[in-house]
Amino acid sequence: MRTRRGKLGALLVPVIVLAACTVAEPEPPSPAVTTHEFEQRLDEYLNRFASHVLAPDAQISVPAHTRTAGCADGPSWGVVPRSETTVTAGDQAEKLFEDLQPWLQRNEFDGLYDGETRWQTGQSGEFRELAGTNADGTKVLVRLTRNNPQFAITVTGPCTWPPDRDGGPPTSGRLAPLPAPSAPVSTIASGSYVPPETCRSPNLHVFNSDAPAFTGPGPHPMVLADYAGIKDAEPPTFLYGKFRLPYDWEPEDEHQAQLVVCVRATITRDTGRKVTRNYTFDIVRGGSGLPYEFDVFDSVYLVTVREARTGRVVGESSIPGTVSDENSTPSDMQDYLRPVAVGLDNKSLERFLRPFHESAS
């Protein structure tokens, strides 16, 4: 049997030519919401930060709006909206920055971090950053520079449909309403101790959200919180003598307290006087009968009376310290500091508080 060959003697075999084919990448999804509508959502977030965390301790600027063309996770014609506000809070700036973190966590911002709670070093100096993302695509960035009375809050939206492009989604109704903001957390614990955050951050903390309302004729039981300085984490810079409420004004069960009396000690000027006191026992030196010398400073005690269940202010006053130098020193020695504030007289405090104890009107 012969095999058919071509002229060159080669076997004839079929040749299959594979055509080159390319698979087009899928188009990124079109934005489901307009730029204008999401800009309104960003302003809504900034307004919530202002009213539920920052007020009344800060001034907040009118939001500035910018738009960036092109989306990393959307079409090139999409627009990313951005709103930024500046918060001016003086010596409260760092405290308010720190207040924002737990509030954002309670209000559905995930992946939240605060530079591992440490100061970082950049070209403009030391700074802290707080960042997080909401399920609706909103990103928040808060940046604070050390010793700066101001910090910036920036909120950025997802990819949106620009106003100059036809065929977009409806201008309203595409975004679900924001859920109600979280309520302040109760700080009540067993015993008479009132955590300072009850007074320092009343937008985030109340003493007891289940406390009886402050209303009608008294008696209205109250508890006391006294503190110095700006933040819990700061070491005190001066000492002052203890003061207290009248015994029968405090409830036997702290859950029945209707009022929280917040007293913040401040010093105003150095009197130039010195006072020496011996302590029968002290933790600092581990001994007894050792003299300690103090520099005496004039003082003012800022008194704020708050409803225990809501944190609302029902009364405020500034009471100067008038106690003798000797009685202004601490009753026990646990942390020796040279500056000591002139103490608050218990009877002066009682005179201011008596109307609140007797009546809510």
Image (cartoon, rainbow, N blue to C red):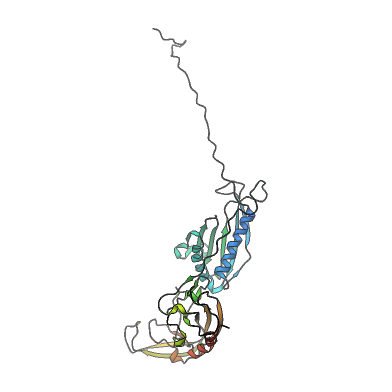
Q: Residue at x 55, y 57 (%)?
A: 138
The residue positioned 51% from the left and 87% from the top of the image is 349
Count of marks overlaid on the render: 0
Residue 314 can be seen, yes or no? yes
Residue 224 in the figure: left or right of residue 58: left
The vertical placement of 108 against 335, above or below, is above
Rendered image quadrant of residue 327: bottom left
Give how far across and how far down residue 172 sits, in percent: 64, 54
Residue 305 in percent (x, y) is at 53, 81
Q: In the displayed image of the protein, which residue is found farthest to the left?
A: 287
Q: Is any atom of residue 230 visible in this view?
A: no
Quarter that holds the N terminus: top left
Q: Observer-nearest residue: 287 or 199?
A: 199
Counting from the top left corner in percent of width and height, residue 91 is at 53, 74
The one of 351 and 197 positioned closer to us in this rendering: 351
Which quadrant of the view contains residue 330?
bottom left
Q: Determine whether, in the image, residue 259 is placed left or right of residue 47.
A: left
Q: Is residue 72 above or below residue 324?
A: above
**Residue farthest top in this picture:** 1
**For this view, does 65 lie left or right of residue 256?**
right
Residue pictured at 47% horizontal, 76% vertical: 196
Quadrant location of the C terminus?
Answer: bottom right
Q: Residue at x 48, y 73 (%)?
A: 210
Q: Percent from the top left, x then y, of residue 300?
A: 52, 85
Q: Compared with residue 223, is residue 16 higher up or lower down, i.e. above or below?
A: above
